[in-house]
Image: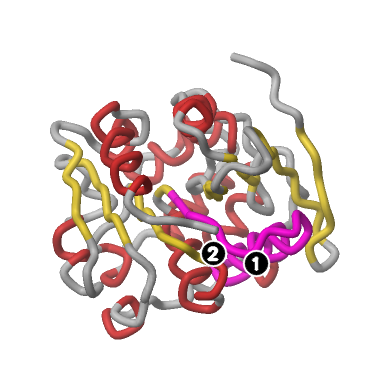
């Protein structure tokens, strides 16, 4: 993989690491990764950065607070999708960008939802990847995942979902204590009524075997004009780099001007 040109900025006292790749005059795409992931794992190793740049886009991607190269925090009050969305908005301010295509995967999709709801003037379009109906339904198990992350060893973790998160967090070299604080943070609700207020064009793309994300069609049905794309045969972990997912996103973006 090519070496990324990492930069950082201060977002309300928190150091956020980011990359800014591609031609500066190209339409900008903001990428927000999922829980326990980072820019390299979610977007570079899956060839998303190269795919978007080769298609003529400028790509801005950040490691959200507590993840990757960004500052690690251990206070639950310092986390949550609305705060992540404000970090993203401040990054756009830092770069002097007005409007962007916003794309998030899993937790990152929740962040993009808050960005689109709280700052609609900054969003040309939104791609919700890896998160469908469960965006508004929610998923239980945060405490079990936190306990797994704080356990002295994965060997003592028996809860299957929590164990999978611990396995992924270790594989990505994450700070387990920071992630535990993140997963236990106040989970701001997103209701069907809220997503119905999103005015930007929306694509919802979820794997057909993704039990974590839920139905793409069910979420898209709540958002006026939204499109749904089912990533055939893929679960939550394998959908993100799928070639058909990439083609669907490029087709979607090509139909939405962003200036």
Question: Could you tell me residue 220's position as x and y percent?
Answer: 21, 64
Where is mark 2, residue-wise? Answer: 184
Q: Is residue 206 left or right of residue 184?
A: left
Where, quadrant-wise, is the C terminus in this rendering? bottom right
In this rendering, the answer to whether 139 lies above or below 45 is below
Query: Which residue does the numbered mark 1 point to in the structure image?
Result: 76
**Residue at left 50%, top 23%?**
45
Q: Nearer the viewer, residue 98 or 10?
A: 98
In this figure, which colouring scheme has been used for the structure? secondary structure
Side (left or right) of 238 relative to 166: left
The image shows residue 144 at horizontal and vertical percentages of: 42, 55
Q: Residue at x 57, y 48 (%)?
A: 28
- Disc 2 to disc 1: CB gap under 8 Å: yes
**Horizontal and vertical percent position of residue 182:** 59, 58
Q: Is residue 89 magenta?
A: yes
Label 2 vs 1, first from the N-terminus: 1
Magenta segment: does it hold 196? Answer: no
* 220, above or below 26, in the image: below
What residue is rendered at 29% in x and 26% in y?
A: 243
Within-10-Å neighbours for mark 1: few <14, some 14–19, many 20+ = some
- In the image, taking residue 95 as reference, residue 114 lies left or right, namely left
Residue 73: percent from left, percent from top = 74, 56
Inter-mark Cα distance, 2 to 1? 6 Å
Considering the image in quadrants, where does the N terminus appear?
top right
SS at mark 2?
loop
**Chain part drawn in magenta:** 80-104
With 221 as the anchor, is 181 left or right in this view? right
Q: Residue at x 51, y 25 (%)?
A: 50
């Amino acid at each position: 993989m090519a070496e990324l040109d990492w930069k950082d900025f201060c977002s309300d006292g928190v150091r956020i690491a980011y990359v800014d790749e591609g031609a500066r005059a190209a339409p900008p795409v903001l990428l927000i990764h999922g829980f326990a992931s980072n820019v390299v794992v979610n977007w570079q190793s899956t060839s998303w950065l190269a795919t978007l740049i080769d298609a003529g886009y400028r790509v801005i991607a950040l490691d959200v607070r507590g993840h990757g190269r960004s500052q690690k925090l251990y206070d639950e009050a310092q986390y949550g999708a609305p705060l992540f969305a404000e970090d993203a908005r401040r990054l756009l301010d830092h770069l002097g960008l007005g409007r962007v295509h916003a794309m998030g995967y899993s937790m990152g999709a929740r962040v993009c939802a808050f960005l689109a709801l709280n700052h609609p003037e900054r969003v040309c379009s939104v791609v919700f990847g890896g998160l469908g109906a469960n965006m508004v339904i929610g998923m239980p198990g945060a405490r079990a995942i936190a306990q797994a992350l704080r356990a002295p060893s994965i060997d003592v973790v028996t809860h299957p979902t929590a164990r999978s998160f611990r396995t992924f967090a270790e594989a990505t070299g994450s700070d387990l204590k920071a992630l535990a604080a993140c997963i236990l943070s106040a989970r701001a609700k997103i209701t069907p009524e809220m997503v119905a207020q999103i005015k930007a064009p929306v694509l919802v793309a979820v794997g057909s075997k993704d039990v974590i994300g839920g139905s793409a069609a069910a979420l898209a049905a709540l958002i006026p004009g939204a499109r749904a794309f089912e990533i055939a045969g893929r679960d939550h972990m394998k959908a993100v780099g799928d070639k058909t997912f990439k083609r669907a996103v490029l087709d979607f973006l090509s139909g939405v001007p962003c200036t």
